[in-house]
């Protein structure tokens, strides 16, 4: 008899040691009324309440208010009684009010005679894994969105380039240049994890593609202006078109022409706005086109959604001016906040 008692006591101590050493799992036992009878160290670490606070208390306290209103704790016990055990994944509450995402298993504890005596619930904190899955899902959604936008832009570039081209060779050259400009804009954004870039960086990339880095024939100045990805891509394409036209017909078609690009930020009615100007001078006499080509349409369409666009074919050189609220150039940045 004494040997049996010793074995029983030893077994209980062993089980108690196992329960309290399993700190990566919340192990909770309850009576048939759902009142806590065991609350291990893992439960303290994961859920925040001490053993003293929880013994004799309803286990439903760590369920969300919505789940409590829907009687989910009671439903879990009924399911366990009916099926022997049950699994679930859901949000749970910590003592400090924060939420954790946990996978749980509920089992019925039975007497030697097979009668139900209570329940055992084991929880594993999977919050970080859940957040990682959500971030991955968001990333895939964003990637899909960007891919569709990119394909749409390229499709438009191809279609419009074909319409305005006079030869296959011209189509190939024009397409390559325009898609390369779009690719450079993507590269700029990739350096910043596709979050944003700034106008100086976009202009510098355009100047580099024209082979005018450090050249007195392209002067630019202006304050730091952050751009969201949509604005950066649009402005990159526009600068490419302006540079291409300047090289063919404008200030860069001779040895004396000059391009200046300047921008300022002001406050109109309390809202900051930008005024950016591309101005050519010293090139051949400008003759306004009889009809809009794809380049002109791309410039108009790309910038029209951001603000007011003014294109003047002055005899002294082309002048393109954009007035836009900064908020429209940074729309995606505010949406992400």
Image (cartoon, rainbow, N blue to C red):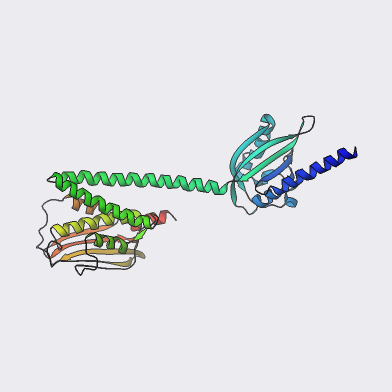
Examine the rendering and report whether any part of residue 70 can be seen: yes
Q: Which residue sits at x=88%, y=39%?
A: 3
Locate residue 31: give its quadrant. top right
Compared to 63, does 75 lie above or below? above
Examine the rendering and report whether any part of residue 39 can be seen: no
Q: Which residue sits at x=68%, y=40%?
A: 121
Q: How many marks?
A: 0
Looking at the rendering, in which quadrant would you find the C terminus? bottom left
Q: Which residue sits at x=16%, y=44%?
A: 163
Locate residue 87: give its quadrant. top right
- Left or right? Give the position of 226 relative to 254: right
Depth order, front residue of 122/23 = 23
Compared to 16, does 274 lie above or below? below
| Coordinates of residue 289 in the picture (x, y in percent) | 11, 54
| Coordinates of residue 229 in the picture (x, y in percent) | 35, 54
Looking at the rendering, in which quadrant would you find the N terminus? top right
| Coordinates of residue 236 in the picture (x, y in percent) | 27, 56
Depth order, front residue of 204/331 = 204
| Coordinates of residue 137 in the picture (x, y in percent) | 46, 44
Compared to 164, does 235 lie above or below? below
């Amino acid at each position: 008899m004494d040997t049996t008692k010793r074995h029983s006591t030893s077994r209980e101590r062993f089980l108690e040691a196992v329960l309290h050493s399993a700190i990566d799992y919340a192990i909770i036992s309850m009576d048939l009324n759902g009142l806590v009878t065991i609350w291990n160290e893992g439960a303290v670490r994961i859920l925040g309440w001490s053993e003293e606070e929880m013994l004799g208390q309803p286990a439903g306290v760590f369920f969300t208010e919505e789940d409590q209103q829907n009687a989910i704790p009671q439903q879990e016990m009924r399911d366990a009684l009916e099926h022997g055990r049950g699994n679930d994944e859901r949000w749970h509450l910590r003592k400090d009010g924060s939420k954790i995402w946990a996978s749980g298993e509920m089992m019925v504890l039975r007497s030697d005679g097979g009668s139900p005596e209570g329940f055992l619930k084991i929880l594993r904190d999977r919050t970080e894994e859940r957040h990682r899955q959500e971030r991955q899902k968001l990333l895939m959604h964003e990637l899909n969105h960007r891919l569709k936008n990119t394909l749409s832009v390229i499709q438009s570039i191809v279609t419009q380039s074909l319409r305005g081209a006079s030869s296959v060779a011209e189509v190939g050259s024009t397409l390559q240049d325009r898609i390369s400009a779009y690719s450079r804009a993507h590269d700029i954004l990739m350096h910043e994890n596709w979050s944003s870039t700034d106008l100086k960086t976009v202009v510098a990339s355009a100047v580099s593609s024209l082979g005018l880095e450090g050249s007195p024939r392209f002067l630019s100045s202006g304050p730091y202006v952050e751009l969201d990805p949509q604005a950066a891509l649009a402005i990159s394409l526009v600068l490419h078109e302006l540079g291409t036209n300047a090289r063919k017909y404008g200030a860069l078609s001779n040895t004396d022409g000059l391009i200046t690009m300047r921008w300022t930020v002001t406050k109109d009615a309390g809202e900051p706005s930008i005024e950016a100007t591309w101005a050519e001078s010293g090139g051949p006499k400008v003759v306004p086109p009889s009809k809009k080509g794809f380049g002109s349409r791309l410039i108009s369409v790309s910038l029209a959604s951001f603000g007011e666009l003014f294109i003047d074919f002055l005899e002294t050189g082309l002048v393109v001016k954009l007035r836009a609220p900064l908020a429209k150039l940074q729309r995606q940045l505010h949406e992400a906040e």
